[in-house]
Amino acid sequence: MGNINITESEEYTMRKIILLCSAGMSTSMLVEKMKQAAQAENYECTISAHAIAEAAEYGADADIVLLGPQVRFNLSKVKGIVSCPVEVIDMAAYGMMDGKKVIAFVKKVLGD
């Protein structure tokens, strides 16, 4: 792959998406489904899952933080820690491991 040249009129943004759950493990399957969906749509992003206790560390430079439904009660706490949008993953999308639906939601929130 070659270098990407960016002119002033173009804006190249690789989105950083962070998922938070109880231990960082239950969302790893969803992360993989989201990566597949993002790749299929040519949506450039990095996606990773972490424990809710690591919100400050991993959310600091994120474009969006998504909470697993099981930790949704931490929404206001996480919003107070990070400066990006913080949203709860739709329970149905989470349960069905619907990466495409979650990526669509991320794009809507971020205006992509």
Image: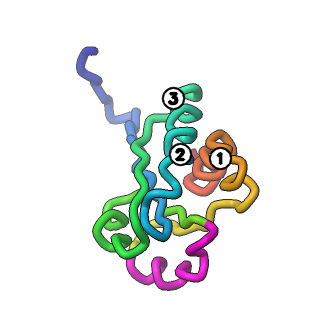
The residue that disc 1 covers is 97
Residue 73 on the magenta segment: yes
Q: Residues within 10 Å of mark 1 (few under 14, many from 20)?
A: some
Q: Who's the residue at 48% across and 84% down the image?
A: 77
> Dividing the image into 4 quarters, which one contains the C terminus?
top right
SS at circle 1: loop
Identify the mark nearer the N-term, 2 or 1.
2
Contact between labelled residues 3 and 1, with CB atoms less than 8 Å apart:
no
Q: CA distance from mark 2 to mark 1?
A: 7 Å
The reply, left or right, for residue 71 in relation to residue 13 is right
* Residue 44 in the image, given as x and y percentages of width and height: 44, 35
Boundaries of the magenta span: 69-81
> Which of the two discs, 1 and 3, labels the residue nearer the N terminus?
3
Predominant SS along the magenta part: helix
The residue that appears at 53% across and 45% down in the rendered structure is 29
For residue 9, the mark is: none
Q: Amino acid at mark 2?
A: Met
Q: Nearer the viewer, residue 12 or 48?
A: 48
